[in-house]
Image (cartoon, coloured by chain):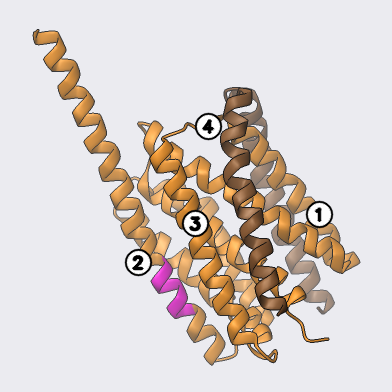
Amino acid sequence: MYDNQTVISRGRESVLETNKVIRNTYSLLSMTLLFSALMAFVGTVIHISPMVSLISSFGAMGLLWFVLPRTAQSAAGIGVVFAITGLLGLGLGPMLNHYLAMSHGGQLVMTSLGGTGVIFLGLSGYALTTRKNFSFMAGFLMVGLLVVVLASLGNIFFLIPALQLAISAAVIMLMAGFILFETSQLIHDPNANYIMATASLYLSILNIFTSLLQILGVFGRDD
Amino acid sequence: MDTGLKILSAILLIGMLVFIFPRMRHALQNAPKGTRQDWLGYIIPLAAVVGFIIFLILMVKH
């Protein structure tokens, strides 16, 4: 009897802890997305150059690789996540200006934004309601990411439009997988960290948005 | 894209490769293997995403 009560109590504690991690992740994610949108707005208004955009991406990647893993267990990690998302948001400036200059660019940007929101909410909802464990996808996702980065590296120099389109489509599929994987980790991994999870989910959302914008930009052109 | 931007972008992507490679090796060695049912649970939402993107493409084309 006592053992049963202990098991139930521990089970309840574990569920409460999981819910807390999920709640913290989504709260921080929504705040960082708002901050990133604000920085993207600043980036478009002040017309930052592609070079500044690339430098801000370098800064964000440096923080993501070298600073965030060391600060994720402390409150400083929250500031680092805001810095990463702010820099990446600012870096969107030239891309957004390019699409906004098209004849119905505003509609394209808003469609991509709405589409990204629907994809993220749908996938997160699916992972949270089914409570499936997607940890088996880790190897597949990392190999896919490596292939996509290699293809992107090649396309910097070859500039093949069809390859760019294929990369964008592959990125959306991969990031969809990462959203399922990361959300299931929040449920199933007892060591899940909400700051790292926020950074990972933010990157997936950002990549889906930019890739969707590229795809819709190609198909939505007037010519 | 000018040459300076291309070179900087390439450096960023090479940095990503350096960062991803050990993680990929670790994931391939340690991640559990998925069953047919597990993969089906991934393919169904993915198919929904593909369908949704086709819908968005048709929407912006008209």
Q: Colour in which chain A is shown?
A: orange
**Which quarter of the picture shows residue A80?**
bottom left
Q: CA distance from mark 3 to mark 2?
A: 16 Å
Which disc is residue A31 wearing? 2
Q: Chain of mark 2?
A: A
Q: CA distance from mark 3 to mark 4?
A: 18 Å
| Side of A164 where A8 appears, left or right | left
Disc 3 vs disc 4: which is toward the camera?
A: 3
**Tag 2 and tag 4 share a subunit:** yes
Look at the numbered discs 1 and 3 and tell me whether their residues touch, using CB distance below 8 Å.
Answer: no
Residue type of the residue flagged with mark 2: Met
- Between A42 and A144, the one lying in front of the other is A144
User: Which residue matches tag 3?
Assistant: A120
**Which quarter of the picture shows residue B28?**
top right
Judged from the image, the secondary structure of the residue bearing numbered disc 4 is helix
- Asked if the stretch drawn in magenta spans residue A37, the answer is yes
Vertical position of residue A117 compared to residue A65: above or below: below
The magenta stretch spans which residues?
A: A33-39
**Tag 3 and tag 2 share a subunit:** yes
Shown in brown, the chain is: B
User: Which residue matches tag 4?
Assistant: A135
